[in-house]
Image (tube, rainbow, N blue to C red):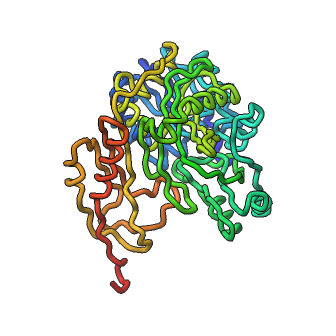
Amino acid sequence: MSAAPTPASTVRPVPDGVTHVLVGYSAQLMAEVDRLLPPGSVLVVEEPHVIRARDVHTAAAGHRCVAGVLAAPTQDEARAGELASLVPRPPGVRAVMPAVEYGVVAAAALAAAWGLPGAGTEAARLLRDKLALRRAAARRDVPQPAFTEATGPADVDALRARHGGRCVLKPANRQASLGVVLMDPGDDTAEAWRHTVAADEPRLRVHYADTARYLVEERLDGPEVSVEALVHEGAVGFLNVTAKQVLPGPYPVELGHTVPAPEDGPGGAAREALAHATAELVAAVGFSTGVLHAEWVLSDGRPHLIECAGRLPGDHIPDLVDLAYGGEGLLAGLLALLSGDGPRPPRPAAQGAAIRFLPTPAAPGAVVRSVSGVTEAEALDGVRRVAVALREGTGIGPVTNSWQRAGHVLATGTTPQEAARTAERAAAAVRFGLAAPAGEPR
């Protein structure tokens, strides 16, 4: 193990007034938590390494809801049961929520130790390990690709040989498409293996012992969707189906989402089947209370499980859900569930919402000279946000995971289709002027 737990003697008293504990720090999430919870009501518990690498104390101080930041080994999943001895229970605590992927197990363990609603520690462990999740789903006969653990290129080639040379190689415990490779016949297995094994998030993740595991699985063809579900004591309540677009090629980075999935599209047509499959998945992992973000591929019209996270989705999907459905937002519903306020019932969407990620220019090695069209994109009727990640002087590289996208636009419309068209128009309006790096011929 590379990081030692924080000794109990060094833990400072919890500030008065804390009602919610967030495991992990997410700047994007905190902006919404600020809106929903009163000043000084949130304790952030985060890994010491991550606190230092991201200067979490300074970042969290900018949010009025944060009462304090506590350092603890939140990513030591093998010893999550010991965390409650290192994190004092706030007397007025009502809910514990994972704010990041790497806090899912710790949040479940703290909730269980404190007698609060949560996923359940074992369910959280299954959701954090894609290989363990596959095995649990198989025991319940949840449809999914053929799979096996991969300990080296030979395991990858063995499965590929049984499926026409095509497969998916991925780490068992990463996020944001990190390290995922889609392989076709003729692709270099050794090169793919090197890419997958090297994939990491050094500012977000700590290396504890025996956490590096990989799996290889059958590559299925068909539209991809995700399901966002609020679950109360094992029963699915609110449920949304999101249609998605994925970057073609070996790296399945998501390029866009539409909420809800249009009724005349594959995701909308398969809503009933997706709801049934999600309920089966809940039962397969023994999930109790919280939110699930499950990804599915509709192969031959049937949902097949890709993977599932036991926390709020990324990619601004909560924003899309809130815009499309109105009323109680996804985060607000989750906080209510985890506070013991009962199930969150299904409800229909009132409009459509969509996000499209700006295409990174296909010019690796070039440098951004200018960004134009942002004002034009923002002026389109229905556009809610335009965010550009590439700045002047930024170097262009290949897009192999979600962190490398160029930005995004978010739009609404009277229908999901209208929202998607507006988002696509706005994304197309943003243009990047490029130049060769300094010292290279132009």
> In the depicted view, which residue is nearer to us: 330 or 280?
280
Residue 144: x %, y % from top left: 69, 42
The residue nearer to you, when weighing 29 against 286, is: 286
* Residue in the image at 71% along x and 37% along y: 78
Residue 159 x, y percent position in the rendering: 77, 57
Between 110 and 306, the one lying in front of the other is: 306
Q: Is residue 61 left or right of residue 194?
A: left
Residue found at x 56% / y 47%: 175
Q: Is residue 392 above or below residue 296?
A: below
Work out whether residue 160 can be spotted. yes
Report if residue 70 is visible in the image: no
Which percent across, then down, holds residue 220? 65, 51
- Quadrant showing the C terminus: bottom left
**Residue 425 horizontal side relative to residue 360, left or right:** left
Residue 395: give x, y in percent of width and height: 39, 68
Residue extending farthest bottom: 441
